[in-house]
Amino acid sequence: MKIYFSGSIRGGQQDTDLYADLIRELKQYGTVLTEHIGCKTIDHTLTDQEIHDRDIAWVKESDIVIAEVTVPSLGVGYEIGRAIDMKKRIICLYRSLNGKTSSAMILGCKDLQCFQYSNLKEAIAIFKTNLKAK
Amino acid sequence: MKIYFSGSIRGGQQDTDLYADLIRELKQYGTVLTEHIGCKTIDHTLTDQEIHDRDIAWVKESDIVIAEVTVPSLGVGYEIGRAIDMKKRIICLYRSLNGKTSSAMILGCKDLQCFQYSNLKEAIAIFKTNLKAK
């Protein structure tokens, strides 16, 4: 199974360690195409168009999109929107921060499977219930 | 012409006054379906699914999507992603804040017309050049 993991980059580098933990867990279920999302360094050698075209090609290639949607992000929202039209299975994970949850456009979209979680342990349990180990 | 104006709600209420100014200008070019984006009060009577379904219906109904993409927002990114697959014309406006611009997924997408601007006067000029007065 090919997994497209989506997380905030320019908007939310504060969650990079958590993304890295989630990606490590997801590797039990398939190949994660977007392992760089868990890295603290941003690759500045690619142009915006090269990043866009590579990421959309990866979304197309993937069997499932798993998005961490706690931190507001144009890129994550955009990828979810495109993935819906590609009929991909999409799982969204979000934490409640200061009483705020995720966007109405994400939580209100019945084509997404949205799960609230508080910590890595709970995310691991969500993966276990909803994904098949490879 | 029906205009879908998209701006950050839960993520970026700090820009509401600017959104209201932009919407007022856009009314010279057509009907703005999403006038509430320029209001400081959030309507809590609708469920997330009702908001999602109403907004996606408006994107479908619109002739053009105009998105303010300075503030990171899952909803705005999602709407742009969906609008691309609906083959809508999409204009994105962004300001540079603390040296940060917008997402690579937005700036690198060749299906969007992206314009940087600094203030309302510059946004008005962009509308004048790119839209037809009604």
Image: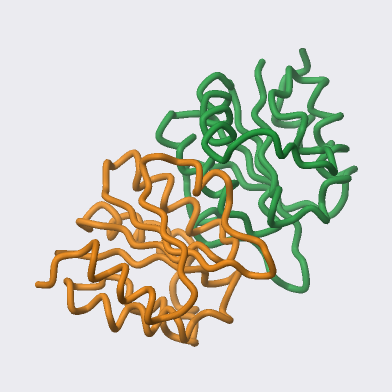
Chain colours: A green, B orange
* B5 sits to left or right of A84: left
The one nearer the camera, B93 or A62, is B93
Residue shown at 45% from the left, 66% from the top: B68
The one nearer the camera, B56 or A128, is B56
Residue shown at 57% from the left, 27% from the top: A54
Q: What is the x, y in percent for residue B107?
A: 50, 48
* A114 sits to left or right of A9: left
Point out the image quarter for the N terminus of chain A: top right
Q: Is residue B132 depicted above or below B113 in this figure?
A: below
Point out the image quarter for the C terminus of chain A: top right
* B89 sits to left or right of B76: left
The one nearer the camera, A51 or A97, is A51
Q: What is the x, y in percent for residue B116?
A: 46, 63
Residue shown at 29% from the left, 83% from the top: B24
Q: What is the x, y in percent for residue B133?
A: 13, 72
Q: Is residue B6 depicted above or below B17 in this figure?
A: above
Q: Quadrant of residue A127?
A: top right
Q: Is residue A72 depicted above or below B86 in this figure?
A: below
Residue shown at 32% from the left, 78% from the top: B23
Q: Quadrant of residue B54?
A: bottom left
Q: What is the x, y in percent for residue B97?
A: 63, 70
